[in-house]
């Protein structure tokens, strides 16, 4: 059985993330979408919130599981028995970062491989940070994220 780990900040999860996860779930037996607890970014949602939102929007999608972690990604991959790390590539600008991370991860654990999915054409422009910016200014993000996330963003910015 091949388990793939799809790690990210998912702050919040977007339709682009879900597209990648579903595509990965057609290749691997289980895809574990894992919320990284301490990304080097300013977060809008807490780890608990990001985890709950991700659980809610992936409920009922076969072969996708959701977890959170606060260790090195490759360590977490080992812990859950994943030999594959899934990432998404939207544009050349993503490449350098993903390439660097993959190389470092390979040094730490050469038995774990990174599989990169090219973003679907519909989602190449889409990032969680764009979603946060639009929602913060009261814009409509209903084409970019699942309905449950639209509600969560509204609640967050109403406060
Ligand atoms: P973001 O870059 O949107 O803040 P994350 O840090 O959670 O999101 O990203 C996790 C992984 O998902 C990264 O490999 C990122 O390149 C990928 N990803 C993010 N948005 C998309 C998208 N629209 N289509 C495909 N992959 C994506």
Image (cartoon, rainbow, N blue to C red):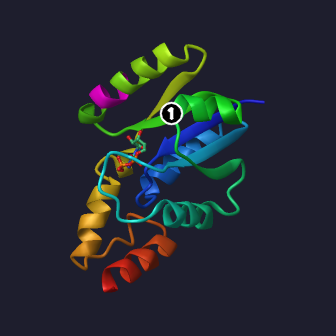
Q: Which image quarter holds the C terminus? A: bottom left
- 114 lies above or below 7: above
Residue at the spot x=51%, y=25% of the render? 114
Q: Quadrant of ligand 1?
A: top left
Residue at the spot x=27%, y=59% of the render? 130
Disc 1 secondary structure class: loop
**In the figure, residue 82 lies in which quadrant?**
top right
- 41 lies above or below 140: above
Ligand 1 closer than 8 Å to label 1 CB: no
Q: Which residue is mark 1?
A: 72
Residue 96 is covered by the magenta coloring: yes
Residue at the spot x=43%, y=58% of the render? 14
In the picture, measured across the screen, residue 17 lies left or right of residue 140, that is: right
Q: Which residues are magenta?
A: 95-99
In the picture, measured across the screen, residue 104 lies left or right of residue 136, that is: right
Q: Does the rendering let one see residue 44? A: yes
Residue 26 location in percent, x, y? 65, 40
Q: Nearer the viewer, residue 101 or 133?
A: 101
Q: Nearer the viewer, residue 143 or 17?
A: 17
State the predominant SS element of the stretch in magenta.
Answer: helix
In the picture, measured across the screen, residue 130 lies left or right of residue 46, that is: left
- 48 lies above or below 154: above
Residue 13 location in percent, x, y? 46, 58
Residue 129 is covered by the magenta coloring: no
- Crowding near pointer 1: few (<14 within 10 Å), some, many (20+)? few
Residue at the spot x=42%, y=61% of the render? 12
Residue 68 location in percent, x, y? 57, 51
């Amino acid at each position: 059985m091949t388990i793939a780990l799809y790690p990210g900040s998912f702050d919040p999860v977007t339709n682009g993330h879900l597209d990648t996860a579903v595509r990965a779930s057609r290749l691997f037996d289980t895809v574990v979408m894992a919320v990284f607890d301490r990304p080097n970014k300013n977060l809008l949602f807490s780890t608990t919130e990001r985890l709950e939102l991700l659980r809610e929007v992936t409920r009922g999608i076969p072969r996708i599981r959701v977890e959170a972690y606060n260790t090195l990604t490759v360590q977490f991959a080992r812990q859950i028995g994943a030999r594959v790390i899934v990432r998404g590539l939207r544009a050349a600008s993503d490449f350098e970062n993903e390439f660097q991370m993959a190389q470092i991860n390979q040094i730490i654990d050469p038995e774990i491989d990174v599989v990169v999915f090219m973003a679907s054409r519909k989602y190449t422009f889409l990032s969680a940070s764009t979603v946060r910016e639009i929602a913060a200014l009261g814009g409509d993000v209903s084409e970019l994220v699942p309905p449950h996330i639209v509600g969560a963003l509204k609640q967050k910015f109403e406060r």
